[in-house]
Amino acid sequence: MTSLLLRNGRVIDPARKFDAVADVLIRDGKIAEVGVVTATADEVLDCTRKIVCPGLIDLHVSVRDPGYEEDETTATATAAALAGGFTSIAALPDTRPVVDNRAAAEYVILQAARAGNCRVYPLGAITRDHAGQELADIGQLADGGAVAFTDAKRPVQSAEIMRRALEYTRMFKRPIFTHPQDATLTAGGVMHEGYYSTLLGLRGMPAAAEDIMVSRDIALAELTRGRVHLMCLSTRNAVDRVRRAKQQQIGVTADVAVHHLVLSDDCMQAYDASYKVDPPLRGREHIAALIAGLQDGTLDAITADHQPCAAEKKDRELDQVPFGIVGLETLLPLCIEALVEPAHLTWPQLIALLTTGPARVLGWKDRGTLSPGMDADVTVIDPDVRWTIDPNEFRSKSRNTPFAGRNVRGRAEVVLVGGEIRFRR
Amino acid sequence: MDSATVSAAPIWTRQHLLGLQELSAAEITQILDQAAEFKRLHAQGETKLTPLKGVTVGNLFFEPSTRTKTSFSLAAKRLSADTVDFTSAGSSLSKGETFIDTAKNIEAMGVPLMVVRHSTSGAPHLLAKSLKASVINAGDGTHEHPTQGLLDIMTIREHRGSIAGLTVALVGDILHSRVARSNIWGLTKLGARVIVCGPATLMPPDIERLGVEVNYRLDDVLAEADCVNLLRIQAERQRSAFFPSIYEYAHFYAMNGARVRRAKPDVLILAPGPINRGVELTPDVADGDRSVILDQVSNGLFIRMACLHLCWQAQQRLQAGGHAG
């Protein structure tokens, strides 16, 4: 019997609509009691002026292991996740080889156990080798631990294959995650199509490419009664379509990447590859629509869309540089800057989008809450500490961030996984 | 050789010439005046000047070019510079070296002025950040081609005295044209009215926000245009369904004799080339009395001399001041 008491923090547990200064008692890795705790504990952490909340969950992290260890390994990705306040991450299957078979899924779990940091859940491929042609071993991937299926940044272009995938995965009660984009409209694209792509002479990726695919996937979810989760929504029309689909009770959920809330396409004027992301940074009107979508529940979760990339790959001509920002360690302060400081969201609303929201997408009832009896996955946040983002201090193996040198507020101070302190600043 | 420098001009402070977007009207005018001065000296028989004596100019052409490369090479030689040419075919790039490393290696051999052509927009900007050398953009992707814009403007100014108040039509593939963007910036800053004209599929979004008017029909703009600049159509783009056929393109946009007769009598016909005879313009127009195409080519040499000279002077001043910019 070991016990730990988190004393006198602002405890936010959106699952139970709890938001009050309280103590959290953890015993044998489980949440034992939340409230005014009189019992003693083996260890006491003073959490005065800190936020105590369920451990954060990221729905899709590019872990790059196996095959791209020059960018990231499971050990570095999970260390970065902990430092960012995450206790659970789902790992994208876009590795080499692709996680399109049971052995590959089990390797993801094995690597996570070896790393011993946060929880890692494999995402399985929809199609073999992400080629978009034939279904991967979806049932066996589910048996091997895959919590959802996705072709990551290579969305299934054939509506027929997508239809079959949505039908087939219904049997396993797991959603399809998709990056909604019509590839015929974005081929060779580097940034959002609009005034700035014209100005810079860079090939554009029109918002319509996303709008079309969101509409298609909603139609297919309705047709199949399947469950589709749209990753990294970035356009105004996409948010509108998801809002309407939810009103019609269609099985659709969606998330947004935090960088789409703080950066817009004018950033590309520096021709700096660290701003090159997929979907691309959009204009201000899209940002406003995304924030509205977070406020009214159209968007279920916020993600870092962590895409680590070795320096030698980013230090190239813009059209040859891979997309992506390394994001796990900067998500929390950016959320505070984009959403809490301007009062778009309250703290409990933000925490919900990082805990109960993603848990609901995956159908999890035992994660993302501090309900007594649950595994004690807990994040203690200092919401006020001011610091400067320095990529040299990242636990991630990669440094591809446009946020270097940014003065920010708030970060995770202590992270518990299963009651064990896995991270302490 | 300071005697070749235009007197009373403001001091040029830019080490790099990356585009015309960031230049002021005064800076553009300074380059034009400097080029005109080099041209005047040349006409007087001073074909070899010495301001770049002992300096090596690197011509880094990561994308093939004949005319621009020859023009820069000759411009450097007329200023008494040595030149070293780099082309990507058969180079260390094909061995996997990045173009930044290639440029750094050439810089390390003592090359303080780099003329850079690259198929990726922004590539010279990346080099400017990575090198101490001056970078002169000789065309980057579909972004800018500042010396081409300048030589077009110099040619118009020679024939018309000034740019302000003129109406210039840029015709053709605006979407993929770095020449169009440099012309738009240069001409609008100097007070011209610019109409971009081409098929809707080759018109980039929000181009009006660059300060131009859009018209899809060349026949509608002919009566108003003082100058018509016919941008090159790359036949290979036809495969991407930007327009149905070369034949149909020429039907609507080729400058032919009939269209010249409907234009202003003193219209100037420009083409940055290389031209496809019968596509952008017909041979009778290309070789006709309204065409200033060969003037453009001649002026290109003096514009490039001016750019090399001004950027080199700025670099020396910046280094003398202890901080390279």
Image (cartoon, helix red, strand yellow):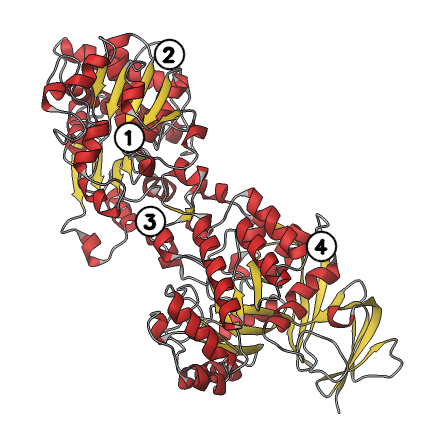
Element carrying mark 1: helix
Sequence order check, earlier mark of 4 and 3 = 3
For the N terminus of chain B, give its image quadrant. top left
Quadrant of the rendered structure where residue A243 is? Answer: bottom right
Q: Tag on residue A345?
A: 4
Specify the label residue B75 is tagged with: none
Comparing A243 with B30, the one in front is A243
The chain letter under disc 4 is A
Work out how far the residue at label 3 is from the one at label 1, CA to CA, in angstroms. Answer: 20 Å
Q: Nearer the viewer, residue A251 or B84?
A: A251
Element type where label 3 sits in the image: loop
A229 sits left or right of B186 in the view: right
The amino acid marked with disc number 1 is: Val
Q: Label 4's element?
A: loop
Q: Is residue B38 above or below residue A253?
A: above
Tag 3: amino acid: Glu
Q: Residue at x 23, y 43 (%)?
A: B237
What amino acid does circle 2 point to?
Answer: Ala
